[in-house]
Image: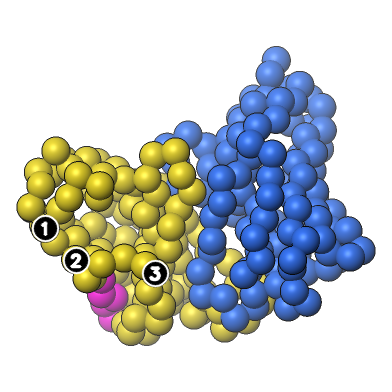
Amino acid sequence: DAKTTQPPSMDCAEGRAANLPCNHSTISGNEYVYWYRQIHSQGPQYIIHGLKNNETNEMASLIITEDRKSSTLILPHATLRDTAVYYCIVRTNAGNMLTFGGGTRLMVKP
Amino acid sequence: DAGVTQSPTHLIKTRGQHVTLRCSPISGHKSVSWYQQVLGQGPQFIFQYYEKEERGRGNFPDRFSARQFPNYSSELNVNALLLGDSALYLCASSLAFFGSYSTDTQYFGPGTRLTVL
């Protein structure tokens, strides 16, 4: 599975959009981009995943660049409860595991 | 519907002891995977079980073993505990064998915090 690079930490003001970037420049055509988040001492929570089209659900939007070498997770109106570590993961459609990196620690501030 | 459940929540053991952790997947899910998360790091894959068979194993010693039962619940066993086994142990379930099709997703439980003294 391709490696991902994320900034170690980011801040966001409450009520504003949080845009979390992820670089996956070695991604292959059959690899999906997954996003999970982990609130302190809890299990990771699935957010969204996609292949090449932009995706949106009730939690977030996933924007994947046309060359698929990077993506951005967007939380449209961040709240204090969105403070967590966000993991960007690349997985092949036959991959039987999730390989977590260091993630981005997002701090939402009042 | 209940999510993935794990027991116990916390556990304290001493070096050399054995531990058994338990996981119940989301209803209807047939695959269970186990991950270890050491403090300050992301989770690391240990095993995947599907239809009671091991279908993948990470880079963990033979002291780690698991099994899956006919009701799809699972146990993780760790023998001869070391201090370095102190971690949050996470169970994740998926509808089918995770890797069989692209839209499948793993859903994680709250974890079991193991402390080895």
- Dot 1 corresponds to which residue? B80
Residue drawn at (70%, 72%) of the image = A31
* Chain designation of label 1: B
B15 lies left or right of B108: left
Dot 3 amino acid type: Gly
Res A3 visible: yes
Q: Marks 3 and 2, how far apart in space?
A: 13 Å
Chain colored yellow: B
Who comes first in sequence, dot 3 or dot 2?
A: 3
Marks 1 and 3, Cα distance to the nearest angstrom?
Answer: 19 Å
Q: Give the range drawn in magenta.
A: B66-70
SS label for mark 3: loop
Residue type at tag 1: Ala
Mark number displayed over residue B63? 2
Prevailing SS of the magenta stretch:
strand
Of labels 1 and 3, earlier in sequence is 3
Residue wearing tag 3? B58
Where disc 1 sits, the SS reads: loop
Report how far apart the C-alphas of labels 1 and 2 lie in the structure. 7 Å
Q: Where is residue A34 drawn, in percent x and y?
A: 66, 59
Picture layout, residue B45 above or below residue B12: below
Chain of the residue under label 3: B
